[in-house]
Amino acid sequence: MKTPCRIQLKIDLKKVLKNINTMQSQIGDCQLIPVLKADAYGLGAIQIGKYLAENGISQIGLADVNEAIELKGLFSEIHLLGDVFESELKTIIEKGWICPVSSISRLKEWEQYCRDTKLKIQFNIDTGMGQTGIPIKIAQQEILEVMNLPWIEIKGIYSHFTNAESAEDDFALQQMKEFKALINDLENNGLKLPFKHIGNSNGINFLPESYKEFSHVRSGINLYGIQESQTSKNGYLAETLELKTSVIKVNDFKPGESLGYGREFIVKNSMKIATIPIGYADGIPYQSYKEGYVLINECKCPIVGRLSMDYTSVDVSNVPDVKINDPVILIGHSGSFKITVEDWACWKNTIPYEIICSFGPRIKKVYLK
């Protein structure tokens, strides 16, 4: 039996593809690698991946082997961007995925897995993140030691910005300078590096040097028109998400009455309150009761009272004729108002990435093609 949908997240795949084309136009000859790691940042890697593959996208970036297994057969080139375990090498070699190398000593130990087929690799260089990667200070010496190993096929080299939200970010510029110098030294020593990339979504937005002098650039959150707060002013990407639910109850409250856990909200004047069936278990920021709102019948309706796991209360005193089943926009447009993922991130004092990665399992995803 088909059950009704209480919370629906619409993901416009045509706009995702449009954003890819917009970014590709901006970066010119550099190739864009869409990054679909972490289930496409919680938005559905299989569904998004199939659509992209059907529309000519041939390469993607992922964090690990399990993600690649889910998308096997869809893309001719998969860049694994995180670290790998030895137990995963057999699968990587069989599938021909591009394996990251974050340690030369570990790479030397992998020969036993590469008796029949060469291992395709990219050197992951730590230019400042400090998590994975070969430290840049020792990278040249170590890479030159293994550049002629017969059982590897060197596809490229990459690194990752710690921050790229400004064209004047000194550390990002220093990362890029050191990374370019390393590439130059390696190539002068005879190492061919077809793939060279450090740029990400913010690199595309702010640092043209991160793609003008490289072969590839990676982008994840830009695919959905979601950006860091500074970047969102650009507005050159299409917004792809709409999150909505419906009013499930309407109550009149008198002065002195309270609502929500902890009785933090005490009614001062008579007001009408609507309950909507979404709570922090679904990803709506718990902190949004302090300054957040939803849109009902083209009106802004402040969130009042502490959120519960399943329900949220909103003030609909100024909404004419509000009733059960009226649509509620949580992310998206209604009349002259809109709510963005970036707004949610501000309410929670976090980053947009965390917001979309936190949408709960009760949210039904609908993909528009």
Image: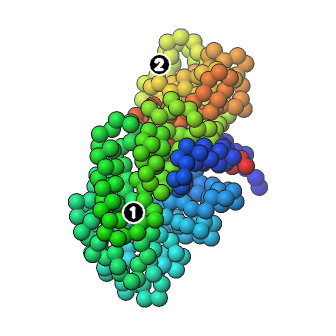
Q: 290 left or right of 29? A: left
- Give x and y (percent) for residue 125: 33, 60
Q: Count the marks: how many? A: 2
- Give x and y (percent) for residue 263: 44, 25
Quadrant where the N terminus lies? bottom right
The span from disc 2 to disc 1 (Cα, nearest Å) is 59 Å
| Residue carrying label 1 | 157
> Which numbered circle lies on residue 279?
none
Q: 123 left or right of 62? A: left
Q: In this picture, is 124 found above or below 87?
A: above
Disc 1 crowd rating (10 Å Cα; few below 14, some 14-19, many 20+) is many
Mark 2 or mark 1, earlier in chain: 1
| Residue carrying label 2 | 266
What residue do we see at 69% from left, 31% from top? Answer: 327
Q: In this picture, is 106 found above or below 64?
A: below
10 or 197: nearer the viewer: 197
Question: Which quarter of the figure has residue 295?
Answer: top right
The amino acid type of the residue labelled 2 equals Ile
What residue do we see at 40% from left, 69% from top? Answer: 192
